Image (tube, rainbow, N blue to C red):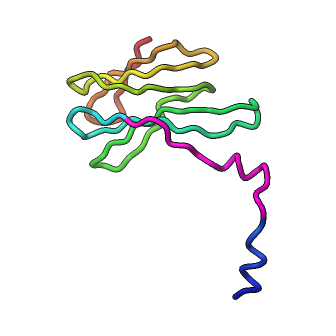
Amino acid sequence: MADMLERTLRGLVPEDLLKFRGLQEIAMSPDGSRVAYTASRADAERNGYQTDVYLVEVEAGTTRRLTEEAGRGSSPAWSRDGRWLAFAWQGEEGAPIEVLTLTHNLSAMEAHS
């Protein structure tokens, strides 16, 4: 057992940093049925960080990434009725603010810039 442990332990190498994810901002919908959050990861190709916005349907346990292009998402915020989700977006081609119209399921979303 000790021999196996010695073989699996090693020091941290730069490539390990690319595997880390950092949960940053969390916003729960007014009725508690959805959670929007941001998560960051290192992006070696761009020599920087990618921060995506995700949406979780709490009851179903499903998660969907809302940001598809390279950039940084932040500050997810819900409308009072929970029908709209807005977040800031700093991307190569995206608008500075994204507002999504959400239906009960994740398959129907409409973006407004």
Question: Where is 85 relative to 35, above or below?
Answer: above
Q: Position of residue 48 (x, y in %)?
A: 71, 31
User: Which residue corresponds to the image point at 31% horizontal and 27% vertical from the top-left?
Assistant: 102
Q: Is residue 23 magenta?
A: yes
User: Which residue corresponds to the image point at 40% horizontal and 37% vertical from the top-left?
Assistant: 26
User: Which residue corresponds to the image point at 22% horizontal and 23% vertical from the top-left?
Assistant: 80
Q: Nearer the viewer, residue 24 or 109?
A: 24
Q: Nearer the viewer, residue 48 or 82?
A: 48
Q: Is residue 80 left or right of residue 36?
A: left
Q: Is residue 65 magenta?
A: no
Q: Nearer the viewer, residue 90 or 62?
A: 90
Q: Which residues are magenta?
A: 11-26
User: Which residue corresponds to the image point at 39% horizontal and 35% vertical from the top-left?
Assistant: 36
Q: Is residue 89 left or right of residue 70?
A: left
Q: Position of residue 1 (x, y in %)?
A: 69, 88
Q: Which quadrant would the C terminus be assigned to in this image?
A: top left
Q: Nearer the viewer, residue 98 or 21?
A: 21
Q: Position of residue 103 (x, y in %)?
A: 27, 29
